[in-house]
Amino acid sequence: MIDPQDRFEAGVPPVSIPVRSLPPPAAMVRAWYRECDREQKAGSTLTRTTFAERSAGMPSSTWIARAVAALLLALAALAPPASARAATFFANDQVLVPRGQTIDDDVYVLSGTVTIDGRVRRSVVIAGGTITLNGQVDGDVTVAGGTVTINGPVGGSVRVAGGTVTINAPVGWDALVAGGDITLGSGSRITNDVVLGAGSAVVSGRIGGDLRGSAAEIRLLGEVRGDVVLNVGERLSLGPQAVVGGDLIYQAPQEASIDPTARIRGQTRFTQTRAAAGGEPRLTERVLAWLGSLLLRLTWALVAGTLLVLLLPRRSATIADTLREAPLASLLWGIALLIAVPILAIVLLVTVVGVPAGLLLLGSYLAALYLSQVFLGLSLVRGAVPGSWRTDRRLQLWLTMLVGTSLVVLVRLLPLPFGIAAWWTAILSILIAALALGAIWTDVTGWGKPVPALAPAAAPAPPSVEPEPPPVGGMAPTSRAAPTQPAATEEEEPITEPSITPRRPTAGQATTSGTEPVPERAEPARTEPLPEERSHPTEERPAPSSPPGMAEADEERKEQ
């Protein structure tokens, strides 16, 4: 007997096995048998392909195989062949590809003078001074140079940037041209569109698509089968052979000079620029434009300063104080960093390992330059406010930042006359950036930061006087002969009445409870130490100082 699971894997449909009599296999096996049973009742046979197409949500190995095959075919179609990935490099003072030579690879050239008379079956990328392409290029042409001349046919697109650009050959796709003087000669045949940006341009060939761009002066002498959309700074002219298959849409100070024999099949729409319509902008317009620019830049600076104060309040306060306390050191360090940091960032970006560090350094450098106006505003206002406002609390720091940054932005963007405003803004921006950048460096490293003066040393505390030990048994010790004490100083509180210290009773004296001991005459000074003094021979206690009047009272008792 064939196991149901084996039947399913082999793709053999059951003939007479009901679904309920099967052991509980996987859900897919149950579905397989159920579908087979239905097909048998209908008189047909179920295949695994049909079952996979019906099973919504169930994985099919056929589907997966087909998807993987389609993906591999797509990758194989997109991947270029091995020959297409090859390239030929030229890096000499003069590069010449002679006539009759054919290069099957992409060509990359870096040279002063480049001349290609042969054929290049793929694309060409050239950077140089004087570039001349007389041969055929089957791919794209990308050129940047001083003088660029293309006389040979190009199968792909042309992208050129140069001082003087001349194209006098057929181009198989688009042309993107930027330069001082641009000439599309009578031999040029551009299959699709042309986009140009030039000081002056002459279009004498044929353009299969649209002509778009801007230039100070444009002369149209050839045929444009699409639309002509131009922004002209001075003058637009159409010669007798000019043909525009679509619309002529242009903006210029004055209407175009159109020859009567020129043909324009579409509409002509002319928009006069504001400068020609009204001359110089009025004073009100200039003031409104300046106010709009000022408010926009001030908003940007205040938003950046608010984020800085909220995120780093203590560091912002210390940098502002450093700028105020060490302006010369900050300026010198800032000038050095303005020059050194970009060079270091470029060196890191050139290396492969240092690209992340270079990007991080460059981003931090640009952020510090923009926040320089915030640090300078904080420093100026913190130097003028009372000491209670020179704190790193966010509220006081934010209010200080609002006032200081507004003042700095307003002064930096003053609308000075006679063209001085641009120089004023540039010089002041460089000075502010140098000061703030140097203050950040000085505050972080401490180099050039002034050392705070040390506080004067406090006077030593007077020696503490050990208090007299309490009397034993409630009786004061017997007064003994002591050296004469110096007179009391002014700080001691005078005693108005002399106090007599009672003597310690002797062994022969009897005292009754509740009665005071009878004072005796003063005994001569004893040289033998007391018992308690014998037990502590090394301890030296200062002699108790007798209050004023005690010596006179002892003398009176002796005389009596």
Image (cartoon, rainbow, N blue to C red):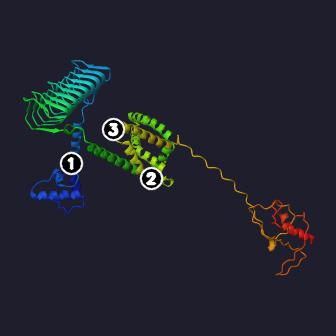
Residue sitting at x 57%, y 46%: 452
Distance of label 3 from label 1 (alpha carbons): 76 Å
Residue 250 is situated, as x and y percent measured from the top left of the image, at 16, 36
Query: Cβ–Cβ below 8 Å for labels 1 and 2?
Result: no
Above or below — where is 89 with respect to 384? Answer: above
Q: Residues within 10 Å of mark 3 (few under 14, many from 20)?
A: few
Q: Secondary structure at mark 3?
A: loop
Q: Tell me which amino acid carries mark 2.
A: Leu
In-front residue for pair 118/361: 361
As drawn, is 498 to the left or to the right of 196?
right
Tell me which corner region of the image, top left, top right, bottom left or bottom right, holds residue 118: top left
Tell me which corner region of the image, top left, top right, bottom left or bottom right, holds residue 492: bottom right
Distance of label 1 from label 2 (alpha carbons): 66 Å
Q: Secondary structure at mark 1?
A: helix
Pick whichever of labels 2 and 3 is earlier in the sequence: 2
Residue 357 is situated, as x and y percent measured from the top left of the image, at 41, 39
As drawn, is 370 to the left or to the right of 81?
right
Residue sitting at x 18%, y 30%: 218
On-image quarter of the C terminus: bottom right
On-image quarter of the N terminus: bottom left
Q: Which residue is mark 1?
A: 63
Q: Tell me which amino acid carries mark 3.
A: Pro
Q: Secondary structure at mark 2?
A: helix
Mark 3 or mark 1, whichever is nearer to me: 3
Q: Which residue is mark 3?
A: 417
Q: Which residue is mark 2?
A: 397
Residue 428 is situated, as x and y percent measured from the top left of the image, at 40, 39
Distance of label 2 from label 3 (alpha carbons): 35 Å
